[in-house]
Image: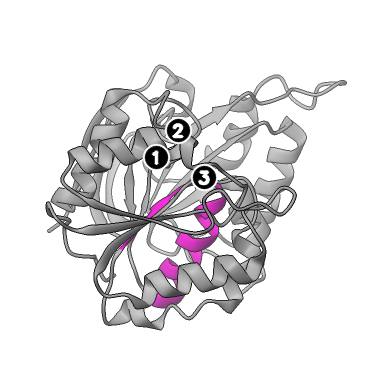
Amino acid sequence: MSIPKRLAAGDKVAIIAIGKKISEAEIEPAVSVYKSWGLSIVISRTIGAGENYLAGHDELKVSELQSFINDSSIKAIVFARGGYGAVRIIDNIDFSPLLISNKWLVGFSDVTVIHSHLNSNFNLATVHGIMPVFFNDASAPSIESCRKVLFEGNMNYNFSSVDKVLIKEGTCQGEIVGGNLSIIYSLCGSSSQLKTDGKILFIEDLFEPLYHIDRMLQNLKRNGLFDNIAGLIIGSFTDIEQGDPKFANDLQSVFRSYFEPLQIPIFSNFPSGHINDNHSLIFGQKVNMEVLNDKILIKSVN
């Protein structure tokens, strides 16, 4: 994997919306934080643009994202929010300039389309991290975790889990890949499908009924995405619906049916995803992962 250079004070960072529309006022808290880090901010024309649900028409988003990719003076591209929209433009973007002038691409949720496409097709590392729309309510540690991965270029985490049912002790080494389960599921069979062999898979999601989570996991299993993974990290699954009649007793029982047979280290309730305490992960960077005594230790391999 190609890892972008660490950011430094004075670097130029672009903020763009490729999914749901968003106003400039909504990103202002993030802009203030980025400036406090010493960064110079470029605001895309997609911020404040709107075409019904979307942040402007697809042609505008393609043009803006392509210009930021092509501009070697821009050292990071931050996606303002998720929602839906990335898959509408992914096949119209030429990502090859990143092979020469790599830069950080930061976001999560719908941005999983970008992560998966770049990780699988270009061997480029990306950041699964907090987006500007969430800065107002985000915890200080989640914002600091984003700064650290961008400015230090590595991860060093030590977290405990209260979910002892979905803990499997062990150690492994590999690149972390993944993101939003719904998006990973939707990319199966496309040129952007996630490649998981020998890697540590991370998943998270929100607002899904249990039967839909089961359907998505069935799809990933049938596509072989669990067959050769080195480890599994389950992030936040927020506001999951049981359904009526209920599909299963709880989310943990659904996960157990898929993951208990796997002979790999597994950790659940990792603080990353659609929560205020959303810690950043570098997708594509090799790490050592150890799960022991209900704790996970993740450290980048330099």
Q: Which residues are magenta?
A: 104-122
In the rendered image, which residue does mark 3 sit on? 81
Q: Residue furthest right?
A: 245
Seen at 19% across and 42% down, the residue is 148
**Residue 276 vertical position relative to residue 179 in the rendered view, above or below:** above
Q: Quadrant of residue 162?
A: top left
Seen at 62% across and 47% down, the residue is 20
Is disc 1 in contact with disc 2, using a CB cutoff of under 8 Å?
Answer: yes
Q: Is residue 120 magenta?
A: yes
**Earlier-in-chain disc, 3 versus 1:** 3
Q: In the depicted view, which residue is nearer to us: 6 or 248? A: 6
Q: In the depicted view, which residue is nearer to us: 135 or 40? A: 40
Q: Left or right: 267 with respect to 141? A: right
Residue 57, x across and y down, in percent: 67, 63
Label 3: element kind: loop
What label sits on residue 130 in the rendered view?
A: 1
Residue 124, x across and y down, in percent: 34, 69
Label 1: element kind: loop
Q: Nearer the viewer, mark 3 or mark 1?
A: 3
In the rendered image, which residue does mark 2 sit on? 134
Seen at 26% across and 75% down, the residue is 72
Q: Quadrant of residue 34?
A: top left
Amino acid bearing label 2:
Phe
Distance between the Cα atoms at labels 2 and 3? 8 Å
Seen at 38% across and 58% down, the residue is 199
